Amino acid sequence: MQNFWKKLKKPFFCLAPMSDVTDIAFRRILAKYSKNRENKDSIVFWTEFVAADGLCNKLAKKKLSHILKYSEAERPIVAQVFGANPENMKKACSYIASLGFDGIDINMGCPDKSVVSQGAGAGLIKTPQLARKIIQAAHAGIKSAGLHIPVSVKTRVGFNKEDIDNWIPELLKEDISALTIHLRTSKELSLVPANWDYIKKIKELIKKSGKKILLIGNGDVLDLKDAKEKAQKYGCDGIMIGRGVFGNPFFFAFQKPGFRNLEKPGFGEPFEFTSPPAPLLDKERVEEKLKVLIEHTQIFDKELAKPKHKSFAVMKKHFKAYVNDFPGAKELRAKLMETENSKEVEKIINDFLRKI
């Protein structure tokens, strides 16, 4: 299989891997309303991250299988995996590669204590030699499956403090096609602004390595306009977006020559959990937005809802993003939070729409 990274148009844009957010239901909605003929070579989707150790356990593997489900419309799609055991990483990547993913990304930046305590995620920043063995194991696993797909890494600028000069060169010694940098330390979580000035130093290290490794910046990207500006200002090959995508299925649907879908202004605004309500939307756009929410919940019910994999409560975290910028949104959202399935969501929304 050809390395898809080499075919992307720059700057390209990536959907960040977010646990219980970027599942197959969310990605299918995003692919349907954001991907098109004009931007398909500029958008990369990531799965939620999956535990390498879990994929090596028969029972756990079955429970985790939903994370690695995807549709063809989502391509190119990268499976993200985390772990600190090279042998398990090899086995896991062999299995992941066999599923037909375009690439595998190794999480070396998650600051969650349950992950770090295993020595995985951001914990690998403290053990660079083990991190290198993990990358090597991923390649070995892919090779054992008789395949050849690229390996990339997503990490942070340091653990307790910025440590770019010591940490990044270790990663660059290995065969990685792309490097995503969350521009904060693990200790900082997302509590401080991302420091995009770090990009310059990392670019210099990549250049010094003599390798053609793509650099993806990540942190505090609000919308595609902001992403394009950051790519141009700091010289990144790509930009990864996380929280800005919430409740915005048209996020990646930009038009020439701009990077925002001006035909969908209700969806084109960045979503902030702490932001004041956006300007009132007209009835047509409210209806469109809520119909997409119904569709999203229906896919969730079909693919993920218990007894299959996830509680419907996971779906509810999207409600505030969809239902937050029009008259009656607060009351509607309160009713939706009481629902247990997509049929109940559909009924409540249709009742609401008949009254406006």
Image (cartoon, rainbow, N blue to C red):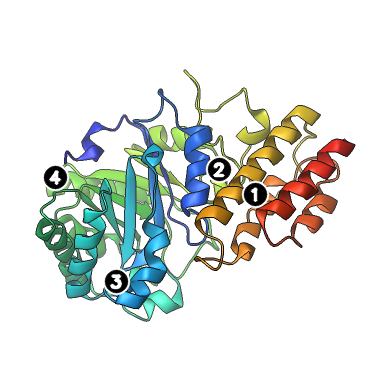
Along the polypeptide, which appears first: circle 2 or circle 1?
2
Residue highlighted by disc 2: 222
Along the polypeptide, which appears first: circle 3 or circle 4?
3
Q: Hey, what amino acid is under mark 3? A: Gly
- Asked if labels 4 and 3 touch by Cβ distance under 8 angstroms, the answer is no
SS of the residue under disc 1:
loop
Q: Badge 2: how crowded within 10 Å, few (<14), some, or many (20+)?
A: some
Q: Hey, what amino acid is under mark 2? A: Leu
Q: In the image shown, does 215 or 102 lie closer to the viewer?
A: 102
Instruction: Write down the quadrant of residue 170 in the picture.
Output: bottom left
Q: Badge 3: how crowded within 10 Å, few (<14), some, or many (20+)?
A: many
- Asked if labels 1 and 2 touch by Cβ distance under 8 angstroms, the answer is yes
Along the polypeptide, which appears first: circle 3 or circle 1?
3
Along the polypeptide, which appears first: circle 4 or circle 1?
4
Residue at horizontal 42%, vertical 49%? 218
Q: Hey, what amino acid is under mark 1? A: Glu
- Specify whether 159 is left or right of 306: left
Where is residue 80 shown, x and y percent of the image?
Answer: 33, 58
Q: Hey, what amino acid is under mark 4? A: Lys
Residue furthest to the top: 257
Where is residue 217 shown, x and y percent of the image?
Answer: 38, 46
Residue highlighted by disc 3: 83
Residue highlighted by disc 1: 272
Of the residues tagged 3 and 2, which is closer to the observer? 3
